[in-house]
Image (cartoon, rainbow, N blue to C red):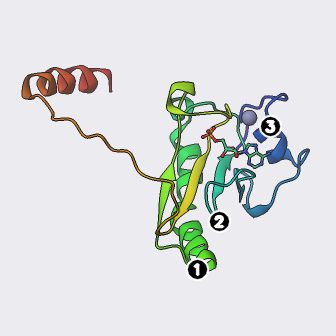
């Protein structure tokens, strides 16, 4: 993408420019997909934009689209290669959400029975009054 931002100190920018090697799965002018070096499961891989964006709210929609358009095909390829029975797509924004590398990335994490990764989803109950306020606040900010 022309004029995409970059950060010379960023490890994923360095992978994007080829300064640091990776186990490459796919590359075009704007995105790169490669195996995660610390996999949570067999076949865990990452999709990054070549431009340096920390969190998704900083990205132009076309840079998001360039990454997300890979998700169906790369998911199919990972399923075909690993035989996994399901997979999680994860994208962490901010340290509190688990982001360790400050260059946006999508994880594809294959799941198999007994993989011990677990799944925490402690669902609450939406309060109707709070929902009304939230809808007003979020739609006003949109
Ligand atoms: P997150 O916690 O969402 O920021 O995830 C960062 C991911 O990047 C982790 O799963 C790391 O294992 C992975 N990672 C860090 N450095 C590299 C690298 N040089 N090559 C491939 N994956 C990496
Ligand atoms: Zn970067």
- In terms of image quadrants, where is residue 98? top right
**Where 132 falls versus 68 (above or below)?**
above
Task: Identify the secondary structure beneath mark 2.
Answer: loop
Q: Are marks 3 and 2 in contact (CB under 8 Å)?
A: no
State the image coordinates of residue 56 (x, y, percent, origin top left): 53, 35
Residue annotated with mark 2 = 43
**Where 51 falls versus 96 (above or below)?**
below
Q: Nearer the viewer, mark 3 or mark 2?
A: 2
Distance between the alpha carbons at the discs numbered 1 and 3:
29 Å
CB at disc 2 and ligand 1 closer than 8 Å:
no
Badge number at residue 12: none
Badge number at residue 80: 1
**Where 61 falls versus 75 (above or below)?**
above
Badge number at residue 11: 3
State the image coordinates of residue 15 (x, y, percent, origin top left): 82, 46
CB at disc 3 and ligand 1 closer than 8 Å:
yes
Task: Identify the secondary structure beneath mark 3.
Answer: helix
Q: Residues within 10 Å of mark 1 (few under 14, many from 20)?
A: few
Distance between the alpha carbons at the discs numbered 2 and 1:
10 Å
Q: Which numbered disc, 1 or 3, marks the residue that appears first in the sequence?
A: 3
Q: Which numbered disc, 2 or 1, marks the residue that appears first in the sequence?
A: 2
Q: Residues within 10 Å of mark 3 (few under 14, many from 20)?
A: some
Q: Nearer the viewer, mark 2 or mark 1?
A: 2
- Residue shown at the point (75%, 52%) measured from the top left: 37
- Residue shown at the point (11%, 28%) measured from the top left: 127
Task: Identify the secondary structure beneath mark 1.
Answer: helix
């Amino acid at each position: 993408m022309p004029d995409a931002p970059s950060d010379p100190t960023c490890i994923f920018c360095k992978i994007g420019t080829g300064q640091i090697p990776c186990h490459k799965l796919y590359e075009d002018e704007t995105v790169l997909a490669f195996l995660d070096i610390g996999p949570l499961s067999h076949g865990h891989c990452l999709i990054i934009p070549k431009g340096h964006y920390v969190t998704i709210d900083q990205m132009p929609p076309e840079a998001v689209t360039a990454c997300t358009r890979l998700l169906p095909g790369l998911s199919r390829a990972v399923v075909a290669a690993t035989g996994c029975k399901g997979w999680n797509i994860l994208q962490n924004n901010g340290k509190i959400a688990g982001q360790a590398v400050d260059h946006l990335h999508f994880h594809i994490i294959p799941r198999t029975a007994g993989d011990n990764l677990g799944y925490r989803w402690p669902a609450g109950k939406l309060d109707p009054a709070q929902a009304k306020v939230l809808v007003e606040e979020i739609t006003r900010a949109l």
